[in-house]
Amino acid sequence: MLERLLARGVSVVLDATNLKEIHRRPLYRIAEEQGARLVLVQVKAPPEVIRGRLDARSFQGRSGNPWDQSEAGHDVYEKMSEEAEPIQREHLVVDTSAEIGRAVEEILRELRKVTR
């Protein structure tokens, strides 16, 4: 679907974990083949912040925030953290434990550079 949308000139935001470089490579290829500007954003937070968010999520259960529905808990977070590989390409890093307004502005600046 990503490839078809880009081929039509549609800008796309893909929200995916993609912890391993081998899983990111097809995205790189698609963007290159379609002549699309690829802006990679790594979203991070300190482990204690993430654990607090996971605790809050499990405490709220399914009646909590409808935008934050996930079965992932501490065990999934720990496993994913162990498997994460560094991003090999230029990318932006956003720390979501702090105010993210500046980071969003930087992402928007990068996106404005898009020329098709």
Image: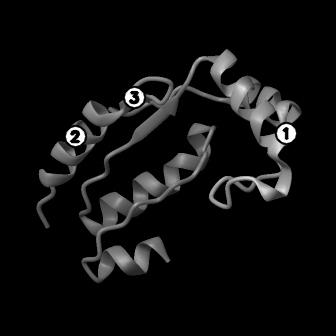
* Badge 2 vs badge 3, beta-carbon distance below 8 Å: no
Vertically, is 49 above or below 102? above
Vertically, is 9 above or below 94? below
Q: Amino acid at mark 1?
A: Phe
* Badge 2 vs badge 1, beta-carbon distance below 8 Å: no
Q: Secondary structure at mark 1?
A: helix
Q: Is residue 42 left or right of residue 57?
A: left
Q: Where is the C terminus found, in terms of image quarters? A: bottom left
Q: Position of residue 38 (x, y in %)?
A: 31, 51
Seen at 88% across and 32% down, the residue is 75
Q: Secondary structure at mark 2?
A: helix
Q: Amino acid at mark 2?
A: Glu
Vertically, is 97 above or below 33? above
Q: Position of residue 64 (x, y in %)?
A: 75, 53
- Separation of disc 1 and disc 3 at Cα? 29 Å
Q: Secondary structure at mark 3?
A: strand
Residue occupied by mark 1:
59
Q: Position of residue 105 (x, y in %)?
A: 22, 40
Which is more N-terminal, label 3 or label 1?
A: 1
Q: Is residue 106 left or right of residue 44?
A: left
Seen at 77% across and 53% down, the residue is 70
Q: Amino acid at mark 3?
A: Val
Residue occupied by mark 2:
105
- Separation of disc 2 and disc 1 at Cα? 33 Å
Seen at 68% across and 61% down, the residue is 66
- Separation of disc 2 and disc 3 at Cα? 13 Å
Residue occupied by mark 3:
93
| Image label count | 3
Camera-nearest residue between 11 and 56: 56
